[in-house]
Amino acid sequence: MSFLPLVKLWIWISALASLAGWTLSASGQLNRPGYMACFAVAAIILFLKSPGKHPTFNIQRRTSNEGARIENPGRWRLNVECWMFFNKFLRRFKRPLPFCFFALAILIFLGGAIYPPDNYAALTYRVPRVLQWLARGHWFWIQTLDGRMNDRACGMEWLSAPLLLFTKSARGLFLLNFLPFLLLPGLVFSVFTRLGVRARVARQWMWLLPTGYSFLLQAGSAGNDTFPAVFALAAVDFGLRARKSRKPSDLWNSILAAALLTGAKASNLPLLLPWAVVIFPLVPLLRKKIAATALIILIAAAVSFLPTAILNSHYCGDWSGAKIEPPALIVKNPLVGIGGNTFQILLDNFAPPFFPQAGWWNQNAPLILPRALVAASKNFDTGFFQLGELPTEDWAGLGFGLSALLAISVVAGLFVRHAPVSAFRSPLFAFVRLAPWLALLAFCAKSGLTTTARLISPYYPLLLPLLLAGAAQPQIVRRHWWRVLVCGNLILAVAVLILTPGRALWPAQTILSKLAAENPDSHLLARAQKVYSVYAGRSDPLAGVRDLLPKEISVVGFLGGPDDADISLWRPLGTRRVEHFFPTDTPEEIRRRGIEYAAVNGAALQADGTTIGDWLRQSGAELVGTTNETLKVSAGAQPWIVVRFKN
């Protein structure tokens, strides 16, 4: 079975999910009946477009009765095809690299199935914003201190909405990353070979690229950084296929994939450059079927970042939403942005995967690094020099193993003598290989975020063809030392996957608690125990606060900081609604929104210039209970209170 039909299926599922989300929101029917109607319409269209029955073949079976026809040739043919596919599957995964990918995929699935999603960004704003829309029956601009709940792209959210609505659980959200992860090898091979990478080289890197730490760790989580990589590859792949096939359908799939790429994250917008280079000469193909092309373009506009950009312009006067984000997220000086982001990409990708000295580095890096770099860091968000003891999905890029392998391969290729001249194909292919690097340059010139290595995950697959298209690489991948490095990279990938605090596949807390008891003076063991402990409860960070609330209430007020997660207060999903309010809201305004009980973060009040006692007096609320909760290791324990507003 070719991977291509699966890629097309994923593209159309993603497009229909976004289209259904916006359409149902516009009609105020973002609910179960609305989605059931969408499913019915999609099923009818699929039935009308599906091909007819398979033709009957005169297949004969060798028996004692020569020439006797089998009773059910269609069923016999299906059984043969299934058996052939199964044999081909087994033969493919008997090879070392495919087998390792298969083993890693099993570990990823186990981690995603065992642990609930704990991606902090998902818990803080992506899942809660979907729950807000489902509670109201439509998309709306949420009153909150966290601007990300309003101005960010909605691709992952519209995919997760029906899962949350029908299952009333977030446990299955990891599948939205796991399924496209399985499509990466086929797409990587197809795009690499079409862009001039030799088949021998592409056959190695198609299995190696998904072992990048960001891909491995997010494939079992609810993150939204790596799943658009499939759309980036598919947009270029179908465009290159259309150059050869001259089929408008290939171009339509390319357009939809490019739209979904931007609909997943606005930071992917620069990646439209290589796609545009590919499809620009193919625009005349679209005139073959004007009506169908117009429909595809309309769907593409609906599933892209365009609806969010229009809403951002309406509600905050800026299509990107930057006006309601921290000012440090946009770098004013492009040269500072390029230099600072280059440093972050190199730092995060070449940092040791197991770095016990991370605490020392985080404290002393500004003191030992060049002053120009330290001065440039002030133009970025907090955490510019920050590293962790272990790679996590919050910041990891390709990671040390794959980055070192890639760097050594490229450098070694410069010293290979008498290498045959590479087939350069045409200037167009050279520019397609160069365009992703120009796109990355544009991203770095503007972004002030401090997890660049993670954010550019969709860029990595398109950046590599320029580095691997040389004629020397087929000789490099034959070398014994290169295979040893590949084994080292795979060992590190397995270790990172097993040890990751969010989905540890080893009895971390049991072993660490025993070691900490035997070595009470070990700061490293104490730190490890604290990290694993916090991650163990990260999926339900305010469970203690929820326990202080009456179980029968249907509306919970929430006053937290811009990076506080309210996901715990929604549980059990489908029975409660969380209403955000501001410290300056009057008691009348709060009660008018149906809020009787509320959870309040004392640190958020302190950041607003007041104390818990002063706010209680001003709001007229009565204290129900207090507790301390740790949402992030770096922030430590913070005081939370539950209050009741008197009628």
Image (cartoon, rainbow, N blue to C red):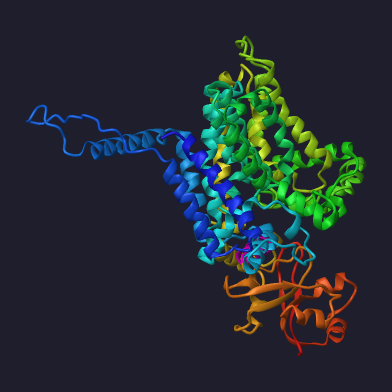
Q: Quadrant of residue 438?
A: top right
Q: Residue furthest front?
A: 291
Q: Looking at the rendering, in which quadrant would you find the C terminus?
A: bottom right
Tell me where residue 73 appears, x and y as whole percent: 22, 36
How many badges with numbers are in the image?
0
Residue 320 visible in the snapshot: yes
Which SS does the magenta portion mostly show?
Answer: helix
Point 62% across, 31% down: residue: 236
Q: Quadrant of the N terminus?
A: top left
Residue 387 visible? The answer is no
Does residue 534 belong to the magenta stretch? Answer: yes
At a point 50% along the width and 58% down the height, the residue shown is: 113
106 or 77, nearer to the observer: 77
Left or right placement of residue 40 versus residue 125 in this view: left
Percent across and percent down for residue 15 are 58, 46
Where residue 416 appears, x then y in whole percent? 64, 15
Q: Is residue 314 above or below residue 256?
A: below
Q: What span is colored magenta in the figure?
A: 525-539
Is 106 in front, or is 492?
106
